[in-house]
Amino acid sequence: MTTLLLEDIAKQLDIFNVSELLPHEQTVPPNLKRLKEAMLNIGQLVDPIIVDKETKVVLDGNHRLKVLQIIECPLSVCQTVEYKDPKIVVGTWYLAVNKPIEDILKTNIKVEKIDCDEGKKALTNSKAPFMAVCKKDGNQNACFIEPGSYRLKELIEEQNYVLSSMKGDFDIRYIPDDQSEEYLSKGYSVFFRRAYTKDEIIKAAKDHNPFPPKSTRHIIPDRIIRLNMRLGWLHEEKSEALRHLNEMLANRVYNGNVRRYVEPVIVIY
């Protein structure tokens, strides 16, 4: 049983050159700063970067990859997955701001009122980069931000433009796309956007045209966390880094330090 578990984990993990990994979205500067400080303080890459086995596109870990680039770490430990597997699901993150919509956007941004349900359908057809929604007197008020008809490259550009045009210094929360109602009921303005497809994500990464931060939310079964790969090992030759990885896995698996959770869990970083 232990041998099978070790083999199952080991075949999902590999060492890649950082230079060959393709990010698909931009990073959030404060998050990047905190992660860099944490990684340097503990001297470890805690969670492996998750990549598509075929294309080496980073599905989860764009911030980790950026930190490795900044500190000039040549190697990364990665969990490889078959992105075409239907069990891997793509969602997105909405933006939630605890202010009225008119206090968030600059006056040069075009806004068009729309029915919320109709707007959700139109978003999937790229008719606007965002739809802003808020609740007033129990009713949902929705409006398109910069309505139009966009191709992928144009949609990415327009989303970046809208985000750069938000006025003031306020806290933007990135929330899972299934938690919008919770935040609307608390008085937040929520900016909806459509989820990108797997093909669009691969294309954006290969074209070096990354999406705005937190554009994608990947649900990946059997995600490996808390690997704790030493950064020093990732500065050695690839064969040596792989040897360290396999030895560490063997020690931890045989000592019973592996847990597989079948229920949703909450991880406190």
Image (cartoon, rainbow, N blue to C red):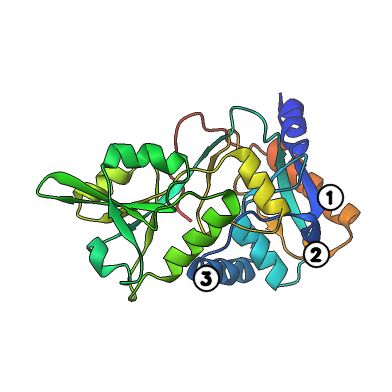
Q: Nearer the viewer, mark 3 or mark 2?
A: 3
Disc number placed over residue 87 in the picture, else none: none
Along the polypeptide, which appears first: circle 3 or circle 2?
3
x and y, in percent, of residue 136 in the image: 14, 51
Quarter of the image with the N terminus is top right
Asked if 64 appears above or below 49 in the picture, the reply is below
x and y, in percent, of residue 30 in the image: 48, 70
Observer-nearest of 138 and 47:
138
Asked if 179 appears above or below 215 in the picture, the reply is above
Residue that carries the numbered disc 2 in the rendered image:
74
- Give the residue type at disc 3: Pro
Along the polypeptide, which appears first: circle 1 or circle 2?
2
Bin the neighbour count of mark 2 within 10 Å (Cα to Cα): few under 14, some 14-19, many 20 and up.
some
Real-space CA distance between mark 3 and mark 2, rounded to the nearest whole angstrom: 22 Å
Real-space CA distance between mark 3 and mark 1, rounded to the nearest whole angstrom: 31 Å
Q: Residue furthest front?
A: 148
- Give the residue type at disc 1: Leu
Determine whether the residue tagged by mark 2 lies in a helix, strand or loop: loop
Residue that carries the numbered disc 3 in the rendered image:
29
